[in-house]
Image: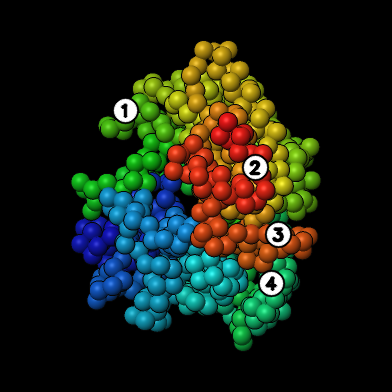
């Protein structure tokens, strides 16, 4: 059964009250790949009456915000699976015409800064009802942060939204604790100590006080210093410090995170009774994001790569939490039993597919470590890189009756992967194309990205071709690259064009760097500094400069040739003209 979205559905369940009403910027799909669905099922499992209001209309008479009335406990608000500004705008700040999380992929079903908008409306209608916010948009905007679309620092989303409590990172455990406290009779306003939560309150003594919002506005160096503290604390195994940041006469107070979930706790979340389908209200409609993940399986959470431009480790954590084989194989069988299943699982993965089951050999050493990456500048000697457990699981999945193929659709860390693992994937789990992310060819840029030197990709490409020949395969390697990252110059992009051409790649999977809140790359972009060294970092900022760098990806297009040749002359790299154009 789906959780209700209307009064009619609430009545059909025989309920005469609701404990929690969830407002989300995404369409309602009851699948464990969608955060709102997971939170709804976790709250339901706590014995609560929960309803979901997907993509409420904020432009009309606000009936979507009024229709279910007042919940007994609180409203829960999320912008959805993506930050609403990333969802709406390209790196060139152009409005997107599509939205994968909406009906028929159409845009316009959620507002800019959806968390702020939804909370503002709810507070105006129900001023006395608490609001809890969460998801990537809220989590990564908990403190002062650079906003690319406003091109300025914005204060904590707790101040702009008016929410009463913010859940940082993955929200299941903090919400379980919150509702259990409320069921015991605690007043919402008195609950200030739950790990992984933040709130805006009166100024008080905290363990670590960040530079105030006002000081950050005055000095980019001050903002950079704040980021180092924030990232260091977020990468600890079991942080203990309460962080605080003043905004005027108030203070954002953020409690330290829970330690990583156990395998049993993660299994519990994924074993909840999801229908794995869009709500019946979308009958006859298509939701592109569902098409992509309908038959996918998340095997683990977390990422210890620590890439500068990525929010995964800040949101999910640096430490890997893996589901048990039993839980994963159970989900495989559920998928195979689906009446519409055609035999193909689209992904067995996670943030990085081949991190399943990997952690430090000496976990006590990991608990003391504060480094943001276990793979940069080199793989940590304490890291267990044995893929045998994962390979064994792949084999068990392949033995499932009714399954033709399970593809590894998530990204693979090629610098971490063993030859045995790559052979296994290429022989049995690739559907013609294997995607990896070298991101750049310049080692100077890669170092700022916290990615491995490009020589690692060259070795991987050689291994990939050897395996193709050995097993008479015809798999294609698809590398991802980024332009306009802090530290990247036109000369770096030109060399990328020459190098990748020499390797016989016509790049397709490319993107222009988009600064998103609370990442190292974004801090470098805004401040022009490396926060850890305070050394200057050059950045391209205008749309024209970004377009110029992006053009080097497409050197093979006739319409780009003259433009690229002119740029190479401008930067004094005529030596590359022949390398690119013979």
Residue at numbered disc 2: 574
Looking at the image, residue 561 sits to the left or right of residue 99; the answer is right
Looking at the rendered image, the disc whose residue lies closer to the viewer, 2 or 3, is: 2
**Marks 2 and 1, how far apart at CA:** 53 Å
**Marks 1 and 3, how far apart at CA:** 50 Å
User: Cβ–Cβ below 8 Å for labels 4 and 3?
Assistant: no
Looking at the rendered image, the disc whose residue lies closer to the viewer, 2 or 1, is: 2
**Marks 4 and 1, how far apart at CA:** 54 Å
Residue drawn 20% across and 62% down? 8
- Which callout, 2 or 3, points at the residue further toward the start of the chain? 3
Residue 50 image-quadrant placement: bottom left
Looking at the image, residue 81 sits to the left or right of residue 231; the answer is left
- Which callout, 4 or 1, points at the residue further toward the start of the chain? 4
Residue at numbered disc 4: 220
Which circle marks residue 256 in the picture? Answer: none
65 or 49, nearer to the observer? 65
Residue at numbered disc 3: 537
Local secondary structure at mark 2? loop
97 or 308, nearer to the observer? 97
Residue at numbered disc 1: 342
- Which callout, 1 or 3, points at the residue further toward the start of the chain? 1
Query: Where is residue 52 drawn, in percent x and y?
Result: 34, 60
- Which callout, 4 or 3, points at the residue further toward the start of the chain? 4
């Amino acid at each position: 059964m789906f959780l209700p979205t209307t009064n009619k559905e609430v009545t059909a369940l025989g309920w005469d009250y609701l404990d929690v009403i969830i407002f989300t910027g995404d369409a309602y799909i009851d699948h464990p790949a969608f955060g709102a669905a997971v939170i709804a099922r976790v709250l339901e499992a706590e014995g609560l009456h929960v309803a979901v209001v997907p993509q409420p209309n904020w432009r009309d008479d606000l009936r979507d915000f009024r229709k279910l009335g007042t919940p007994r406990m609180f409203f829960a608000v999320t912008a959805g699976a993506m930050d609403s500004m990333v969802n709406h705008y390209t790196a060139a700040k152009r409005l997107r015409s599509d939205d994968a999380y909406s009906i028929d992929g159409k845009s316009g079903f959620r507002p800019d800064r959806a968390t702020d908008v939804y909370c503002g409306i709810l507070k105006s209608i129900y001023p006395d009802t608490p609001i809890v916010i969460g998801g990537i948009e809220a989590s990564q905007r908990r403190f002062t942060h650079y906003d690319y679309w406003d091109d300025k620092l914005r204060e904590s989303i707790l101040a702009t939204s008016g929410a009463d409590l913010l859940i940082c990172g993955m929200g299941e455990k903090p919400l379980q604790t919150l509702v259990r406290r409320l069921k015991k009779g605690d007043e919402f306003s008195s609950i200030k100590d739950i790990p992984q939560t933040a709130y805006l309150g009166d100024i008080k003594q905290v363990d670590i006080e960040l530079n105030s919002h006002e000081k950050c506005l005055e000095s980019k160096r001050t903002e950079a210093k704040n980021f180092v503290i924030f990232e260091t604390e977020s990468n600890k195994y079991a942080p203990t410090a309460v962080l605080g940041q003043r905004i005027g006469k108030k203070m954002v107070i953020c409690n330290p995170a829970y330690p990583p979930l156990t395998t049993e706790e993660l299994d519990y979340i994924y074993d909840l009774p999801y229908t794995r389908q869009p709500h019946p209200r979308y009958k006859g409609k298509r939701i592109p994001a569902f098409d992509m993940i309908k038959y996918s399986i998340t095997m683990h959470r977390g990422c210890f790569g620590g890439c500068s431009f990525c929010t995964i480790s800040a949101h999910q954590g640096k430490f890997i939490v893996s589901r048990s084989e039993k839980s994963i194989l159970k989900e495989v069988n559920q998928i195979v039993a689906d009446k519409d299943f055609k035999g193909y699982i689209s992904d067995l993965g996670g943030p990085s597919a081949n991190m399943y089951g990997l952690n430090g050999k000496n976990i006590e050493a990991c608990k003391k470590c504060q480094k943001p990456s276990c793979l940069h500048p080199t793989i940590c000697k304490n890291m267990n890189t044995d893929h045998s457990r994962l390979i064994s699981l792949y084999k068990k999945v392949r033995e499932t009756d009714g399954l033709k193929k399970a593809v590894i659709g998530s990204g693979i860390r090629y610098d971490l992967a063993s030859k045995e693992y790559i052979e296994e994937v290429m022989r049995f789990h690739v559907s013609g194309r294997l995607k990896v992310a070298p991101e750049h060819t310049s080692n100077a840029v890669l170092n700022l990205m916290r990615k491995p030197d490009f020589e690692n990709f060259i070795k991987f490409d050689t291994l990939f071709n050897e395996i193709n020949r050995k097993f008479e395969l015809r798999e294609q390697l698809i590398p991802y690259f980024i332009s306009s990252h802090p530290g990247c110059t036109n000369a770096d992009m030109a060399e990328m064009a020459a190098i990748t051409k020499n390797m016989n790649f016509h790049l397709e999977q490319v993107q222009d760097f988009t600064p998103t809140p609370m990442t190292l790359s974004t801090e470098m972009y805004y401040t022009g500094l490396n926060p850890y060294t305070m050394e200057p970092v050059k950045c391209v900022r205008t749309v024209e400069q970004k377009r110029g760098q992006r053009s080097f990806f497409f050197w093979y297009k006739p319409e780009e040739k003259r433009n690229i040749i002119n740029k190479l002359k401008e930067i004094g790299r005529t030596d590359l003209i022949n390398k690119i154009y013979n």
